[in-house]
Image (cartoon, grey):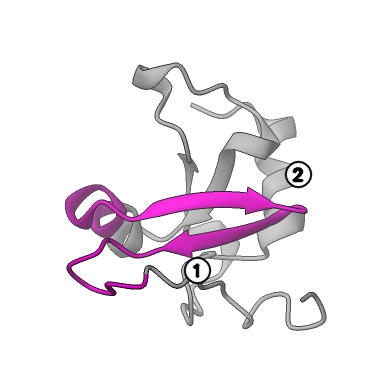
Amino acid sequence: IFPPHIRKAITARDGGCAFPDCTIPAPWCEAHHTTYWSHGGTTSTHNGTLLCSHHHHLIHKEQWRIDITTGVPWFIPPPHLDPQQTPRRNHHHTPQRT
């Protein structure tokens, strides 16, 4: 569980579901540990991202990887979906960032 102050910071950064091309707004999202808490991941802005329920379940089921690089969540698909594992990000909520 992310405390309110960390969730606010993640919301300010992500703006909504961070999964590529998703348009779900932040209030409908869940905070997700990019490195699972059960695997030693910390509860912090650098280890959290907002995901809608659908994409939160997809991340776990399909084994996507999420890297936070320069404050931006990048999604790396599993090899069975993209053999090159090309990183992707959501441009809907934060189009001004590269």
How far from the left and from the top, in percent, is residue 16? 59, 65
Q: Residue at x 37, y 20 (%)?
A: 39
How crowded pointer 1 is (Cα within 10 Å; few <14, some 14-19, many 20+) is rated as: some
- Measured along the vertical axis of the image, is residue 44 above or below residue 20? above
Mark number displayed over residue 9: 2
Q: Residue 84's quadrant in the figure?
A: bottom left
**Which residue carries the number 1 mark?**
87
Q: Residue 77's quadrant in the figure?
A: bottom left
As shown in the figure, which amino acid type bears the numbered disc 2?
Ala
Q: Residue at x 54, y 64 (%)?
A: 18
Is residue 71 inside the magenta stretch? yes
How far from the left and from the top, in percent, is residue 3? 63, 26
Left or right: where 38 falls relative to 87 = left
Mark number displayed over residue 2: none
How crowded pointer 2 is (Cα within 10 Å; few <14, some 14-19, many 20+) is rated as: some
As shown in the figure, which amino acid type bears the numbered disc 1?
Pro
Q: CA distance from mark 2 to mark 1?
A: 23 Å
Magenta range: 57-84
